[in-house]
Amino acid sequence: MAEKKELNEKKIARLIEQLLVELGEDPTREGLKKTPMRVAKAYSFLTRGYRQKIKKVVNGAYFASGTNHMVILKDIELYSLCEHHMLPFYGKCAIGYISKGKVLGVSKLARIVDMYSRRLQIQERLTEEIADAIMKETQAEGVGVVINAKHLCMMMRGVEKQNSSMTTSAVLGSFRTDEKVRQEFLSLIKN
């Protein structure tokens, strides 16, 4: 995916103004006068992951570690937009990895989740992208990522199932090949 330069918020605002007209609204009425630019700024924020690079997000925050025990960070909030309807999905992510001599700064794990979440996504790809990035950045023995999320495209339109949630997982390295490692990860993120 090519990195994109800064968004043209004025152009996006003009498009939103046209959308309001097509929806039957008057973009010059008091409540909507500033809406096109507010929406443009919101989309700039919600899609900033396209304009980020993993090296800058991680920013060299690697630390030597003599152990190769499992490292887990869970309950990482995530907010994304589904690429099919551009409606939000939100939930929590759990990440586990077994280091091989170096660990990543804990906040960087959350920043990686944010970088990939702040793009038009499907949850399945989001889960894989996070796992692949952590595996590559840490050169870990294994990585596991689990995301549980609610999708507004299912809740407020279509089948309208407000209590549904989706769980996806991606396991790499020893998390895939060693059943005991995978089970340890899955049991630890449940607590």
Image: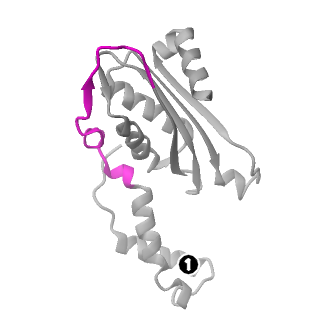
Residue 186: x and y in percent read 59, 22
Identified at 56% across, 41% down, the residue is 92
The three-letter amino acid code for the residue at tag 1 is Leu
Magenta-colored stretch includes residue 69: yes
> Does 25 appear above or below 62?
below
> Does 89 appear above or below 182?
below
Q: How many residues crowd mark 1 within 10 Å: few (<14), some (14–19), many (20+)?
A: some
What colour scheme was applied to this rendering of the protein? one colour
Residue pushed farthest bottom? 29
Magenta-colored stretch includes residue 189: no
> Does 160 appear above or below 58?
below
Identified at 63% across, 35% down, the residue is 167
Which of these two is toward me, 104 or 67?
67
Q: Which residue is mark 1?
A: 20
User: Horizontally, is 185 left or right of 164 in the view?
Assistant: left
From which residue to which does the magenta span run? 48-71
Quarter of the image where one finds residue 133: top left
Residue 173: x and y in percent read 44, 15
Quarter of the image where one finds residue 5: bottom left
